[in-house]
Image: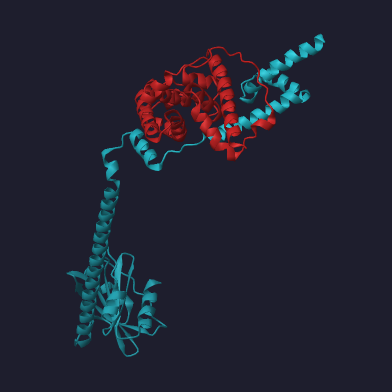
Amino acid sequence: MRRDMSERVGHEAYLGKLDAYLDGELNTEQTRELDEHLRGCSECTAEVLVRVQWKRATRLAGQRFSPDAMFRERIQKRISPGKPFWWHWRPALALATAALLLLVSAQVINRQMVGDKVRLAQASKLNGELADLHVATLASVNPVDVVSTDRHNVKPWFAGKIPFTFDLPDLTGTPFELVGGKVSYLDQSPGAHLLFRVRKHQISMFIFQAKDQPVDFARAQEANAQSFHLESWQQNGLQYFVISDVAPEDLRLLENLFRK
Amino acid sequence: MSVSEERLSPASFEQLALPLFGRLYNFAHWLAQNREEAEDLVQETYVKALKGFSSFEAGTNFKAWMFRILRNTFLNSRTGLKAASVQLELSDDDPSLPVEHQTPETILIDRSSEQIVQEAIADLAVPYREVLLLCEVEEMSYQEIATALAIPVGTVMSRLARARRALRDAVRQRLQRVSP
């Protein structure tokens, strides 16, 4: 009887702790004790189940009200740390930046196009001048000042007449024959003008000191499709031009002989 | 949700306080019982908290601090002053309550009964309503609730026990009224 009474008191004590147990407020030792009691007490276990249901029902019912998005936005604006003055002008700044970039890009492109046009005009002019020199040479009674098929005669002739020297390849076994040479001027700069013969055609080769900007003769040629063929290359600080009415392949063959 | 000292910059307030927005609003609406007043309460809470953020004690619970500001703001409002004048039936400080014995079949709460539970919560006296919501909805510890409500932990426990009992009684009465 006494034991029953003491068990009843113990049971009541555990029952009084159920809320704290379910709220996670008991310490580890208290939780372990209550767990143990629950395993042997169907009354307390049923009570735990009921209280769990109540907790769940209260939680669900309590999550009832939601703020609307506009109110949230209002509060967010209110508590946001101060933005720099330009912050509110971001869209306008973005547009202005885009416009500026567009303007700069347009100017760069424009300059490039203008630059291209200038270079093309220069190349066309050069092409024309070289063609004139070539034609004048062909029409002349004395097309060259040094007449020799021997490169060892022609090359030394230029010494002291032009401010550079160049290599003349051995043309033995090639379709090309050296006719001779003379000094020609391009843009007030002296250079070597060599004349070659291939089959019955004449080829003028001009050698000048190279300028920084390579000459875009490909496009100049497109622009002057009806004129002579012209090949150009830079080599050892010198700018070479070959111009003739021969096929471009012949000009490139001669170029290769010089490049070797 | 404790805050370390180095995070106590005004810039971090938004980061800490904004995630609590929905919860604070829900609590405010339960206290004020209407939308406009709840919005005013929340707005005032954020303004006050932002102003006082530099004095927030680092290492303490930020969530409890925010709820405390909200609750104090409410108590100073017209609705809050009216609610504070309602006397609780029992001594608030007495945590000892007679053990309640329930029978499972009387409290079969499901989703269909949610409205009844909501009405019952709304009818609770503010001191019971707030402690119940902070415990069950906000899942705060007794200590956090004590901080938010500025009352001792013992009072939290006794008030919570009474709030639960009052809620169950109110729900039972309502269920009895609707059942044939």
Choose between B133 and B114: the one closer to the eye: B114
Q: Residue furthest front?
A: B180
Choose between B90 and B54: the one closer to the eye: B90
Which part of the image, by quadrant, shows the C terminus of chain A?
Answer: bottom left
Badge count: 0
In the rendered image, is residue B53 in sight? no
Residue lying at 75% horizontally and 21% vertically, measured from the top left:
A37
Q: Which chain is cyan?
A: A
| A8 is higher (above) or lower (below) than B43 | above
Colour convention: by chain
Which part of the image, by quadrant, shows the N terminus of chain A?
Answer: top right
Residue lying at 69% horizontally and 19% vertically, measured from the top left:
A15
In which image quadrant can residue A3 be found? Answer: top right
Q: Residue furthest top?
A: A2
In which image quadrant can residue A217 be found? Answer: bottom left
Q: Residue furthest bottom?
A: A200
Q: Colour of chain B?
A: red
Q: Tell me: A188 left or right of A228.
A: left
Residue lying at 26% horizontally and 60% vertically, measured from the top left:
A108
In which image quadrant can residue A126 be found? Answer: bottom left
Residue A95, position as x, y percentages in the image: 28, 52
Residue A69, position as x, y percentages in the image: 40, 42
Residue lying at 39% horizontally and 79% vertically, measured from the top left:
A253
In the rendered image, is residue A244 in sight? yes
Q: Tell me: A144 left or right of B165.
A: left
Q: Tell me: B79 left or right of B94.
A: left
Residue A193, position as x, y percentages in the image: 25, 76
Choose between A239 and A118: the one closer to the eye: A118
Residue B64, position as x, y percentages in the image: 47, 24
Choose between A116 and A32: the one closer to the eye: A32
